């Protein structure tokens, strides 16, 4: 279904002259003040991390083997996937999270969420998708989500091949919102579109899957606002019943479609912490693990939680 965001975003990425590494790199700080020390090896691999310094990098990824097709017409001979990378301070390697944006919006609309997650000890990569991001200049078309699942796999493989990204290829997750949540489900559970590198999925406001999901042990954090005016709340309830894997279903009581992710809502800090705790337990293998997630994710009066093994 069409996703209309109903707001305009103006995003500015500041470049820092002291930054080194890939072109387009700049250094910013996470929610907790502090500066990165080049020789800092970073936290222990099993330590829970919050509020570290974050570096932002623009990477011009291009898949020359696949074209952009819409309405039966070939619009481009290659798929341009410009990707913004938010990276924590330290030597790494760090778990990789690919963030998948939705329809009629670009990845930088979610830079607050991505930067915050990076400050929790994750390399967060947010590609722009040709037929969903209006900045790419093509007519918008959300009927090619399978192609976007292929884009996610391409981004993961490209970053894993580049040692400067400091990603740990054994610890990979996908987080998606709206149409991006549909793509994340395809990458995690869709027949023919599963990426075996992915060890956890976060789907925020997805539609029900239109293909039968495969049997899987990849854990899922399912999130939706109960007052979502774009995707019916019943959609995530259907997904909960469709996926045969460990699922944690977090309902944001009274929340809308996108504000909790973009920021400035009462649910924003709850969502941020819930995603970080889920990824800590499932992908990063930090903290107390999955056994305490039911308790950790249900502490706020702004949410309800149900789960299944």
Image (cartoon, rainbow, N blue to C red):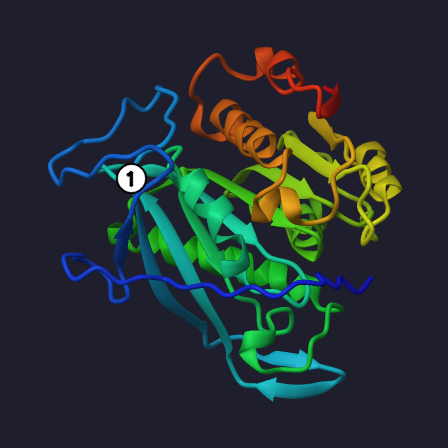
- Residue 245 in sight here: no
Residue situated furthest left in the rendering: 39
What residue did someone put label 1 on?
53
Q: The N terminus appears in which quarter of the rendering?
A: bottom right
Q: Secondary structure at mark 1?
A: loop
- Find residue 101 and report its horizontal and vertical position in percent: 60, 57
The picture places residue 64, in percent across and down from the top left corner, at: 46, 77
**Residue in the image at 40% along x and 64% along y:** 12
Quadrant where the C terminus is found in the figure? top right
Q: Position of residue 180 (x, y in %)?
A: 65, 54
Using the image, determine if residue 68 lies above or below residue 88. below
Is residue 182 visible from the viewing direction of this image? yes
Q: Nearer the viewer, residue 260 or 164?
A: 260
Q: Residues within 10 Å of mark 1 (few under 14, many from 20)?
A: many
Q: Camera-side residue: 30 or 106? A: 30
- 301 or 65: nearer the viewer: 301
Residue at point 53% right, 26% down? Answer: 282
What percent of the width, then of the height, locates residue 179? Answer: 70, 57
Q: Quadrant of residue 294?
A: top right
């Amino acid at each position: 279904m069409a996703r209309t965001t109903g707001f305009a975003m103006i995003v500015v990425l500041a470049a820092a002259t002291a930054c080194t590494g890939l072109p387009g790199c700049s250094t910013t700080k996470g929610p907790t003040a502090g500066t990165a020390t080049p020789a800092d090896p970073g936290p222990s691999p099993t330590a829970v991390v919050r509020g570290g310094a974050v570096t932002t990098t623009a990477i011009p990824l291009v898949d020359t083997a696949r074209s952009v097709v819409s309405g039966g017409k070939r619009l481009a001979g290659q798929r341009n996937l410009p990707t913004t990378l938010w990276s924590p301070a330290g030597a790494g390697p760090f778990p990789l999270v690919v963030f998948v944006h939705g329809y009629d919006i670009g990845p930088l609309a979610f830079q607050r969420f991505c930067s915050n997650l990076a400050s929790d000890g994750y390399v967060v990569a947010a590609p722009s998708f040709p037929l969903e991001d209006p900045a790419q200049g093509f007519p918008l078309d959300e009927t090619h989500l399978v192609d976007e699942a292929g884009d996610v796999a391409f981004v993961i493989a490209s970053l894993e091949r580049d040692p400067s990204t400091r990603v740990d290829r054994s610890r990979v997750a996908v987080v998606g919102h709206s149409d991006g949540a549909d793509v994340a489900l395809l990458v995690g559970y869709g027949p023919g579109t599963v990426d075996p590198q992915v060890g956890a999925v976060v789907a925020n406001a997805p539609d029900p899957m239109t293909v039968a999901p495969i049997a899987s042990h990849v854990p899922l954090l399912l999130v939706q606002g109960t007052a979502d005016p774009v995707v019916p709340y019943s959609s995530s309830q259907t997904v909960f019943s469709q996926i045969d894997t460990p699922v944690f279903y977090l309902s944001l009581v009274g929340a809308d479609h996108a504000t909790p992710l973009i920021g400035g809502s009462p649910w924003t800090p709850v969502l941020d912490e819930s995603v970080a705790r889920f990824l800590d337990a499932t992908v990063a293998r930090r903290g107390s693990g999955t056994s305490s997630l039911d308790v950790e994710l249900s502490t706020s009066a702004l949410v309800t939680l149900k789960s299944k093994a």
